[in-house]
Every structure is written in structure tokens, then in C-alpha cells.
Amino acid sequence: MALAQRDLIDELERLPNYRVYGRVAGVLGMTVDVAGLEHVLSIGSRCELHARGGRRVTCEVVGFHQGRARLLAYGPLDGIGLGCKAEFTADEPVVHPSERWLGRVVNALGEPVDGNGPLPYGPKAYPLNAKPLPANRRQRVGGKIDLGVRAINSFLTCCSGQRMGIFAGSGVGKSIVLSMMARYTAADVIVIGLIGERGREVQEWLQDDLGAAGLARAVVVVATSDEPPLMRRQAAHLTLALAEYFRDRDLKVLCLMDSVTRYAMALREIGLAAGEPPASKGYTPSVFSELPKLLERAGPGLSAGAITGLFTVLVEGDDHNEPISDAVRGILDGHIVLDRAVAERNRYPAINILKSISRTLPGCNSPAENDLIDRAKRLLATYEDMAELIRIGAYKQGSDAAIDEAIHYYPQLDAFLAQDKDEPVTLAQSYRELAGVLGVPWAPPEPEPAPEPAPEAVPGAVPGAVPGAGADPVANQGGTMDPEQPSMAPAGDLAARQHSQDQRRRRMAAALNLDLGELEGATLVEPDPAAENS
Ligand SMILES: Nc1ncnc2c1ncn2[C@@H]1O[C@H](COP(=O)(O)OP(=O)(O)O)[C@@H](O)[C@H]1O
Ligand SMILES: [Mg+2]
């Protein structure tokens, strides 16, 4: 009850003190021209149109034409006609997120769409179109972050605050890789933006791939393909705004967006409606200036919190040089390429290691880890070079020692890269297994000097114990590094795993000001006991 009252008071305080009206002076396709507000409105301003029948339609100014403001709507234009009232509402769209949004699914307007009742609002307004943090005040990217996918953890290791693209044609497995990361990552909180997907896919993804345990420590923002372009664009902005909210609470956030291409398509529709000229592949110039503004919002924060971003790019016609792929590749700190040819032979995730790159490598690895992945990549490259000849039987065993070695190791490396979507794999386990495949004796990397003991978590305070950027270098990824150990066995016994899960729940509950009971049953990380003690 107290909560409902506070929400109501907050709502009332947010109401504007005065109202300004104009009138609809023209409607053409998806655009509405409004007269009478030219001196109040600017690009990005919002208006509410009073449709006949009482419905309200929120619109945004995308341009000016012949002395009138040109608007696009966030909803259908049914009931809008000449002379309808257009009420100026607010300039800058904001959201009031709260930690209680975890486990919820919202639309681009921040309204709940999961049928689980109203959302509580937090006290602080977060602008949806926030500017990226100033580059000179940001932390550097932190230590490695466990993404739970074997091929990525080993060959394309990602650091806290890094931004990576996942590039693939349709149906090659982008969404499933994202769901694996969402479920198995060691990040504290996951913010997921599903932009422009088909409605059927969204439900299936949420229920079958992400599941209840994955959702428990995530917030999902959804705008399906049938929604107006402004909604799809805003869903992407809201996703980043929510990630910024959790980052500012010094949490390690994993921001997953599926897909940036659909976001770019929404920008294209908006640009064309505003009268921009189409440039490459019909994308308007503003698309290419907006993309970096969105993607740069992910990254390290000013203190311990960081947003690690994974953005999928739908590569149309499997052409990896199409304009959006090109632009996104240039902005991000690495790319993971999923290959249709690999998916066609049923090896999932269909990551093409040789075409993918993480730009924080080799710096974030120990020399032993770099040697291991260099050797594996050399073997894969040698095999790929000769693959055609080997397949048709034109290569004669014994002609070249390096090729013979590559042929020997290839089936095991290929099996190593495969991972069932229900199988979590930790960072330490990834290296241990790769060493096992290559027959390299593997010892745990030297442990880092023990950190200061973490202060007791105080409910309501953000505890120092929350792992920040750089808190979990691989040196802390202990476990028994025994190449003989079966590949599925995670490090540590069940009791230790349970203990680390409990520790992590307590830390999360304190950082987010939640009751411990609310995180009951949520699998927070595939535990890595040594990292837990950092
Ligand atoms: N790890 C996996 N294990 C088994 N099948 C997979 C895996 N990843 C993808 N697939 C198959 O590929 C199909 C398309 O995957 P999806 O992630 O929806 O592709 P995209 O998002 O790239 O369009 C899935 O329906 C599934 O059959
Ligand atoms: Mg998909």
C-alpha cells in the first residue's frame, strides 16, 4: 500500500504544470503534420494527439515541412483527422527504473507486457536518449567475463565493458547463442532488448530458450516487427537506459540486443518519413550517425559498474559487407561470425573461429592461454585451407606433417566448439578442455594476490563486494585443471556450488535492495568457486 501511494505521488509530481495545444493540419501515410506548435516543438519533442473517440496517440517530431511540424506516431493513427488536438507533452523521454523490474518483460514505453501486474517506479529519471559517458572519464575494460559459451570463452574471450557484435544470416543461431549467454554468464544483471523480432519468436525465446531462471535476473524489453518504427527505436534506447541504471549501481551488466539491424531498419523508416534522402541500401545518413550513439552507451562505467554489450547483426543475404554490418563492425570491440556452412552440418553454435575476433585479445590472456588458442587456431586454419582437397580425397596422408597434424586434431576441435544449448561451460573449464583436446598439460594460472576482505553487505548499500570491472581476471578462475577430468564436470563439488550461489544471491540482494527471498531459485551464475572469493 505504502508503495502504491509513493508511486502515485511520484506520478503526480511528474505531471507538467501547464498545457500547450496545436491542431492536426495534415496526415500522409504514417506522418502527421501539426500546426500551431512550431515555436514550442523541436526535433525529438513529443505530442499527444487526441483521436476521435477519445483515444490518445503519442507522437514524436521527426522534422519540419512548410512551416509545420512533422510527426511520427508510437501507435496506429486510427481516429486521427484534420483539426484533432495535438498536445505538447515533454521534450525528453525518461524512464524511472527500479530494481524490481528484474524478472519482468516491458515494452518500449516501459510498460509491463508480461501480465504480472503493474511495475513499481524508481525515484531517479533516466533519459532514454542519454549520451555515452565521456571517454576520458571512463574506466578501462575490466577483467574477463564468463559468457558461458565454450567457443567464446576460449577463442573470443570478452572482458567486462567490452562490446561485441554477433554477425549472421537469418536462422543461423544468433538468438540461441544470446539465450545461452543470458543463462550462463557470470554478469550480475542482464538487460535484453528484443527489437523487431516476430511476435511468435519472442514468446518462444522467452519461455523455451531464456526460461524462468534466466529471466529472474534479467529485464527484457520487447518491440516486435509489427510495431511502429518509433517503438522499435525506443525499445533499443530503453534497453541501454536500463543497463545504465544497473551500471550506476556498480553492477556488472550484460546487455544483449537482438538485433541492431532491426534497430537500423527502424531508423531508416523514420529517416525516410522525415524526408531524408536514402543513401546506401536505402539507409539514410542519420542511421549511420545514430548507430555509434547507441552502441557507445555500452562499455565501462565511471566506477565499478560496466555494461558488456553483445549486439546481433542480421547479415542480409549472408553478405558480411552490407552497410549495417560494416558500420557496426567498425564501432565495436570485436565480432563473432556465425557461419551458415557450419550450421548446415549441424554444429552449433555455428561460430567461425577464424573469421571472428575479440580486440581485447591477446592482452587479457596469460601467455599459456595465448599459446593454447594460437596453436588451436593454426590447426584449424591449416585444415580449412586444405578442407576441399581432404574431402575429395586428393590429399595424400604423409605428404605434409603440419596437415597431417591438423587432420588428426580437427574432429576433436570441432567437437570442442560444439555446445548443446542446455550445457553451461565456465571460463576455466573452456581452457582446461581445450588443453585436454590438444594434449597440453594444463595447470591453473598463478592466482592473483588475495584481495582485501570484502566488507559485510549492508542491506540498502551498494557493497564493495559486488564484482566490478576487472574483478575477475582469469587468474581467479580456479578449479582443478586436470586434462583427464571428464569435460562436462564443472569445478568444485555440489556443496561448494550451492555455497557460492548463496553468497552471490546475498550480494545481489544487498546491491539491489531486494529481499533475499525474491532471488530464491534464480541461478545467478554457473559458479566458479575461486572467482567467488575474489
Ligand atoms: N546450440 C544449438 N543447438 C541446437 N540447435 C541450434 C542451436 N543454435 C541454433 N540452433 C538451430 O538453429 C535454429 C535457428 O536459431 P536462431 O537462434 O533462432 O537463429 P537466428 O536468431 O540467427 O535467426 C534453431 O531453431 C535451432 O534449430
Ligand atoms: Mg533470431
Image: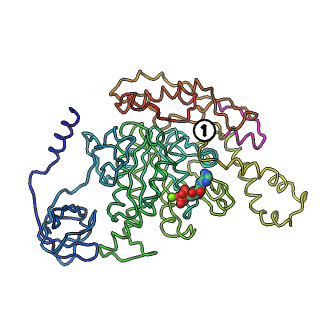
Q: Residue at x 76, y 35 (%)?
A: 441
For the magenta stretch, what is the residue range? 431-446
Ligand 1 sits in which quadrant?
A: bottom right
For residue 217, which quarter of the picture?
A: top left
The question of residue 433 being in magenta is answered with: yes
Rendered location of residue 505, percent (x, y): 45, 29
For label 1, count other residues whose C-alpha is less than 10 Å away and answer few (under 14), some (14-19) or many (20+): many
Figure check: 28 above or below 255: below
Name the side, left or right, on which 451 lies relative to 508: right
Name the side, left or right, on which 315 lies relative to 125: right
Name the side, left or right, on which 428 lies relative to 326: right
Q: Is residue 416 visible?
A: yes
Figure check: 33 above or below 493: below
| Tag 1 residue | 426
Q: Residue at x 31, y 52 (%)?
A: 128
Rendered-image quadrant of the N terminus = top left
Rendered location of residue 152, percent (x, y): 60, 48
Q: Is residue 173 visible?
A: no
Q: Residue at x 39, y 38 (%)?
A: 303
Figure check: 178 above or below 390: above
For residue 489, which quarter of the picture?
A: top right
Colour basis:
rainbow
Tag 1, which secondary structure?
Answer: loop
Rendered location of residue 486, percent (x, y): 72, 35
Rendered location of residue 426, percent (x, y): 60, 38
The question of residue 516 being in magenta is answered with: no
Amino acid type at image mark 1 = Thr
Some atom of ligand 1 lies within 8 Å of the CB belonging to the residue at label 1: no
How many numbered circles are shown?
1
Front-lying residue, 326 or 113? 113
Name the side, left or right, on which 251 lies relative to 152: left
